Image: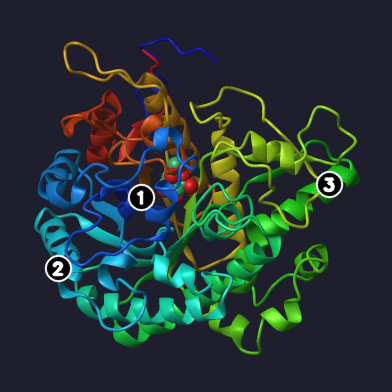
Amino acid sequence: MTLAPNSPDATAQLRFPTGFHWGAATAAYQIEGAVREDGRTPSIWDTFSHTPGKVHAGDTGDVATDHYHRYPEDIALMAELGLTAYRFSISWSRVQPTGRGPAVERGLDFYRRLTDQLLEAGIQPFATLYHWDLPQELEDRGGWPERDTAERFGEYAALAAEALGDRVAVWTTLNEPWCSAFLGYGSGVHAPGRTNPRDALRAAHHLNLGHGRAVAALRAALPDSAQLAISLNLHQVRALSAEPADREAARRVDAVGNRIFTGPLLHGGYPDDLRRDTAHLVDWAELVRPGDEQAIGAPIDVLGINYYTPTLVSAPQHEAGLSPTEAARHDAHGASEHSPWPGSESVLFHLPPGGTTEMGWAIDPSGLYDLLTEAGRANPGLALMVTENGAAFPDVLTAEGAVHDPERIAYLHSHLAAVHRAVADGADVRGYFLWSLLDNFEWAHGYAKRFGAVYVDYATQRRIPKSSAHWYARTARHNAIDAVHDQG
Ligand code: FCB
């Protein structure tokens, strides 16, 4: 439908609930740099990025956006953008360099200064305890496939809570444990780069258990005030057709992509079909000990959903699709000969129709709407937040020193419209965090993919807000978007 410019609908606004959090998200290894300062020791991402061939162009997070030194400037930028919340992650290797023992005060001091200054600027700090950067020493002792790593994570959570508990509005235990487990230990495109489906499944359980231990530690340290969350990259899994074989493919991918986490976290335990699909790879009875599922299922306050693109799958008879191994070769997270989908060996993956971002991810805001409404229905009483959403496009800095990124604005507008529609249809969505505040180290893609609302000139570390940053600032200030997006 085309609307005349003076039609009343063309100026209508989609208003968000009062108190809706307008945020941006980042992660420690992607922005901080200063990898050897104040007692920090290597994490698995330091090791991985320094391993030849693992990251595009040999890029590393050694300097990244130098946020460790430039955080006051970055907080000023956030204030300019009208952000009311900022989601960052804490580097475990700064706070507890070996992954055990007492905290390092100099490491904690950075987060004390950061959170103090955020609060002074009127921005609520949302802290994520783990965004993929395991201390290397814990990986050397076996990493997430080992149960002890979950216990270590609980101890680290207690240290962080004690030091920062009075300043953090919402604590997120883990960011996207699916990526940690299945890209880190399955397809190997992320640190630590292992390619063993058994390790990947064991890692998933121990990440869940680590979450449970962290929730217990945070509740003990902050009995009255803790608002606790986890951020999952729930896959909006769609079957290519309504035929039973395609639906069966979708069921398998949903099991190992989503319900391996939401099962024990929110619905009492691991689903039987997941255990069956993966029984040839891991001994669930040995892996999951009595009491584990109860610990993992301790109540949380917020479910964070990270969404970028839907996942379209079919049964093997569709010739056009890619097997998990072929799909892994084209995986936008990084190419691999190994599948990140244990138990889904026969499933084919398809590119959903429509346009794509520079990552090759299909642009489909209906996936976000479906995730939010389904998560709302499945978890009545649990607040939801979009803890990541955004897009990479090939941004160009003009001679006048500006970055025009209409495609990113269109992406953000369409996804915020989907969030608004989900709220109107009953989903209790309390906030939206744009990924990302700044261009940064995009994991296996290094600095080649820019997701920021703010452009970073890596040669000078100059920050230049893109047009999308100005658009987002207006959105945050008005707590609303235009009902119809003017593509001009
Ligand atoms: C998510 C990660 C985030 C960033 C975006 C593009 O999976 O949580 O760090 O890489 O993708």
Picture layout, residue 383 above or below residue 403: below
Picture quarter with the C terminus:
top left
Sequence-earlier tag: 2 or 3: 2
Tell me the kind of residue under disc 1: Pro
Tell me the kind of residue under disc 3: Ser
Q: Position of residue 230 (x, y in %)?
A: 46, 64
Q: Nearer the viewer, mark 2 or mark 1?
A: 2
Q: Position of residue 275 (x, y in %)?
A: 77, 69
Q: Residue at x 13, y 46 (%)?
A: 70
Horizontal side, residue 60 vs residue 166: left or right: right
Q: Residue at x 37, y 35 (%)?
A: 451
Instruction: Give me the C-alpha separation between circle 2 and circle 3.
Output: 50 Å
Residue 346, label in figure: 3
Q: Residue at x 35, y 76 (%)?
A: 157
Name, please, the residue furthest toward the front: 52
Displayed quadrant of residue 360: top right
- What residue did someone put label 1 on? 17
Horizontal side, residue 379 vs residue 36: left or right: right
Picture layout, residue 198 above or below residue 459: below
Mark 1 burial class by Cα count in 10 Å: few <14, some 14-19, many 20+: some
Sequence-earlier tag: 2 or 1: 1
Instruction: Give me the C-alpha separation between circle 3 and circle 1.
Output: 44 Å
